[in-house]
Amino acid sequence: MPETAATAARRVLQVGPLKPSLADTLRSTYDAFALPVDAEERETFLAEHGREVGAVVTSGRTGVDAALMERLPNLRAVVNFGVGYDTTDIPAAVARGVAVSNTPDVLTDCVADTAVGLTIDVLRRFSAADRYVRAGRWPVEGNFPLTRQISHKKVGVIGLGRIGSAIATRLTAFGCPISYHNRRPVVDSPYTYVDSPLELARRVDVLIIAAAGGDRTRNLVDRNVIDAIGPDGYLVNIARGSVVDEEALVDALTAGRLAGAGLDVFADEPRVPDALLAMDNVVLLPHVGSGTLETRAAMEELTLRNLESFLRTGELVTPVPEVKVPAAAR
Ligand code: 8YV
């Protein structure tokens, strides 16, 4: 009998840590397995149960690589908590007819707020000024040094998707002229298109990265782009650490070839290069872009809607664009 959504493996598997309430629901409502962390236990689990798994629920921090897909031969859906799905092997999913969903839209506002917050913080040096007060330096050393104004700064956005556009809208209200780089110009965009990250970096005071991670954007912001931002310029990254050559970024900051950086994401999270920890002109956040109660609840709800819909109908609610597997192929 050909495999259909009705006859397919139905077991749900949690891969990697998830929001505790989501993990609880998976266990209690969906009788889900959780993939063991220990290598030996994982091996035993996959040998015993791998064929039963029809859907994985994971997050952008863990994902499903090609090797794990191989061990889940009846996998038909990867339901991803998070908008970014660069940790899931998309070509392997396409080749295997595995559908993938993410959680777009519901986190756009919070991630854009974070980008603006980081931009203000790194230019106005609020976190550094806070440290100055706490260290008791104000009464001893006097006024905190002057900082940089944010209003009217020229801002460049790499990746004018949903989040990039929400950042641009916010910063337009600050009087910032916005230009952007995408693979292609956005039709009817009110912002100025620039056809390379290098040229964009040359033109702006603040370069904000909002592009998706993955192979296509790896080190898109390389040494040359960082140098083009220049010693009076700032870099803000709320996307993925992989989009920036982190070593080049550290070098530029160390040598004073870049004024400062606001970073919510890093190349090897949760590790942050030691050199950055010692700098006062960087703001470092532990990947909290979407991390509010409201947004994480909305992400959880959308994740569960995708799972429920997939189990009932074989269709995902918010499939990612690259992997729209027609129902007939599943
Ligand atoms: C989350 C994110 O921190 O959505 C994304 O791509 O990076 C963040 O919203 C992450 O997905 C949670 O695991």
Image (cartoon, grey):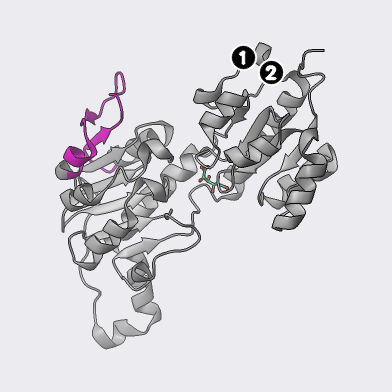
Residue at disc 1, CB closer than 8 Å to ligand 1: no
Q: Quadrant of residue 248?
A: bottom left
Judge the density around disc 1: few (<14), some (14-19), many (≥20) Cα neighbours within 10 Å.
Answer: few
Q: Is residue 209 left or right of residue 231?
A: right
Give residue 288's position: percent from left, percent from top: 50, 53
The Cα–Cα distance between marks 1 and 2, rounded to whole angstroms, is 7 Å
Residue 181 is inside the magenta segment: yes
Residue 219 appears in the picture as rendered: yes
Q: Is residue 141 above or below residue 181?
A: below
Viewer-proximal residue, 117 or 209? 209
Image quadrant containing the N terminus: top right
Question: Residue tagged by mark 1?
Answer: 326
Give x and y (percent) for residue 165: 37, 33
Determine the residue positioned at 57% across, 34% down.
103
Q: Quadrant of the C terminus?
A: top right
* Residue 181 found in image quarter: top left
Identify whether 28 is placed above or below 1. Answer: below
Q: Amino acid at mark 1?
A: Pro
Residue 327 colored in magenta in the image: no
- Residues drawn in magenta: 173-201
* Rendered image: mark on residue 330: 2
